[in-house]
């Protein structure tokens, strides 16, 4: 009997979920949704603190960087339906307990949207830069997975720049990729997770068909950090039983990044694409100086902070 009840619940759960809409349908809904949202002053200030200029922020707002609105979650869905949008299968929308369609905007995931763009120029999904980190997470997807008539967006990579570029940079994070593209004009792929290989490979295949020849790995400089223990991991250091001068947490972090880099090189070799590493903020021995971690940090640095180097 218990097994039958479990199977029945699973069946009901599957019946409640929706098949994800294709990118074309998602794009149509998301573009209409953006017309109803704006980028708030506090979120513009966050981008300014990162070092972005006003024209760069304006371009990002036009691309879909907008603030969420928990208080209008039902109203947004209603206005989209009234404008002719079909919300079924669009990640981030679901049917609530009252039978009304609703956008998955809550106080818990309050923040600003970061659009993920496909090679074909479709708005495929959104990540949210949280105002208040949740369980140490700064970013979550706009998702309605496990909700009635809702679904997950998956984990798509995002393209910032020219889809027909001969050279593309690959880095960790959608926001990081867009910021660096805005500052440099180079084409970037923002990978939402360093272990997100499948989606990354699919985009590289698409870009190669459009003329891509060269890939530059621009993951964070953790890949070249020194492992010396300086007791800088907070409370974790109190219970650390490491026997030696190296920090085990730093070792694990560096190895994770390096495995991601190695996987990118393997993908590029399989696709016959040239691939090499970008490095910055390094010392004479080629190790990270721990001032500028991400490629965005480096490109947005103040002019007087010109020490170090970039190798690509």
Image: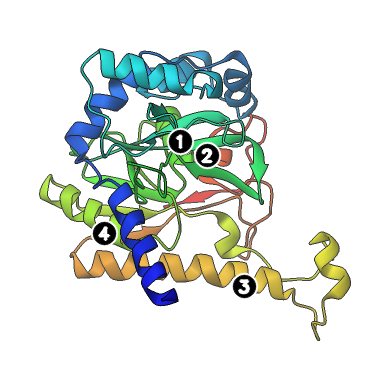
Kindly indicate whether the residue at mark 3 contacts the one at mark 4 (C-beta within 8 angstroms).
Answer: no
Q: Position of residue 20 (x, y in %)?
A: 25, 45
Write down the quadrant of residue 30 in the picture: top left
Write down the quadrant of residue 269 in the picture: bottom left
Residue denoted by label 1:
180
Residue count near mark 1 (Cα–Cα under 10 Å), binned few <14, some 14–19, many ≥20: many
Q: Is 269 placed above or below 213 here?
A: below
Q: Residue at x 34, y 42 (%)?
A: 158
Residue denoted by label 4:
201
In the image, taking residue 16 as reference, residue 133 lies left or right, namely right
Q: Which mark is residue 252?
A: 3
Mark 4 to mark 3 CA distance (whole Å): 25 Å
Q: Label 3: state its secondary structure.
A: helix
Q: Label 2: state its secondary structure.
A: helix
Mark 2 to mark 3 CA distance (whole Å): 23 Å
Q: Quadrant of the N terminus?
A: bottom left
Q: Is residue 302 visible?
A: yes
Q: Earlier in the sequence, mark 4 or mark 3?
A: 4
Q: Earlier in the sequence, mark 1 or mark 4?
A: 1
In the image, taking residue 222 as reference, residue 232 lies left or right, namely right
Q: Earlier in the sequence, mark 2 or mark 3?
A: 3
Kindly indicate whether the residue at mark 1 contacts the one at mark 2 (C-beta within 8 angstroms).
Answer: yes
Q: Label 4: state its secondary structure.
A: helix
In front: label 1 or label 3? 3
Of residues 221 and 253, the one drawn nearer to the viewer in this rendering:
253
Residue denoted by label 2:
296
Q: Earlier in the sequence, mark 2 or mark 1?
A: 1
Q: Residue at x 21, y 38 (%)?
A: 23
Q: Residue at x 38, y 26 (%)?
A: 100
Q: Residue at x 51, y 24 (%)?
A: 68
């Amino acid at each position: 009997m218990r097994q039958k009840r479990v199977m029945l619940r699973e069946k009901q759960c599957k019946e409640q979920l929706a098949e994800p809409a294709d990118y074309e349908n998602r794009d149509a809904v998301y573009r209409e949704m953006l017309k109803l949202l704006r980028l708030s002053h506090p979120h513009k200030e966050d981008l300014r603190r990162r070092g972005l200029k006003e024209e760069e922020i304006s371009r990002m707002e036009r691309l879909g960087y907008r603030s969420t609105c928990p208080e209008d979650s039902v109203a947004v869905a209603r206005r989209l339906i009234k404008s002719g949008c079909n919300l079924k299968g669009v990640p981030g929308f679901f049917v609530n307990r009252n039978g009304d369609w609703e956008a998955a905007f809550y106080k818990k995931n309050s923040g600003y949207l970061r659009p993920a763009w496909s090679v074909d120029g479709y708005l495929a999904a959104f990540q949210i830069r949280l105002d208040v980190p949740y369980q140490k997470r700064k970013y979550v997807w706009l998702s309605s997975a496990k909700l009635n008539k809702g679904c997950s967006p998956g984990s798509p990579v995002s393209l910032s720049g020219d889809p027909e570029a001969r050279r593309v940079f690959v880095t960790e994070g959608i926001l990081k990729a867009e910021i660096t593209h805005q500052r440099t004009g180079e084409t970037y792929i923002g990978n939402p997770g360093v272990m997100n290989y499948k989606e990354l490979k699919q985009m590289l295949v698409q870009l190669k068909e459009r003329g891509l020849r060269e890939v530059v790995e621009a993951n964070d400089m953790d890949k070249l950090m020194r492992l010396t223990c300086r007791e800088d991991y907070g409370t974790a250091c109190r219970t650390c039983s490491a026997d030696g001068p190296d920090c085990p947490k730093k070792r694990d972090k560096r190895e994770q990044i390096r495995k991601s880099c190695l996987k990118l090189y393997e993908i590029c070799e399989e696709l016959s694409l040239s691939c090499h590493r970008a490095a910055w903020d390094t010392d004479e021995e080629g190790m990270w100086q721990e001032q500028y971690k991400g490629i965005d940090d480096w490109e947005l640095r103040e002019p007087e902070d010109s020490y170090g180097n970039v190798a690509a």
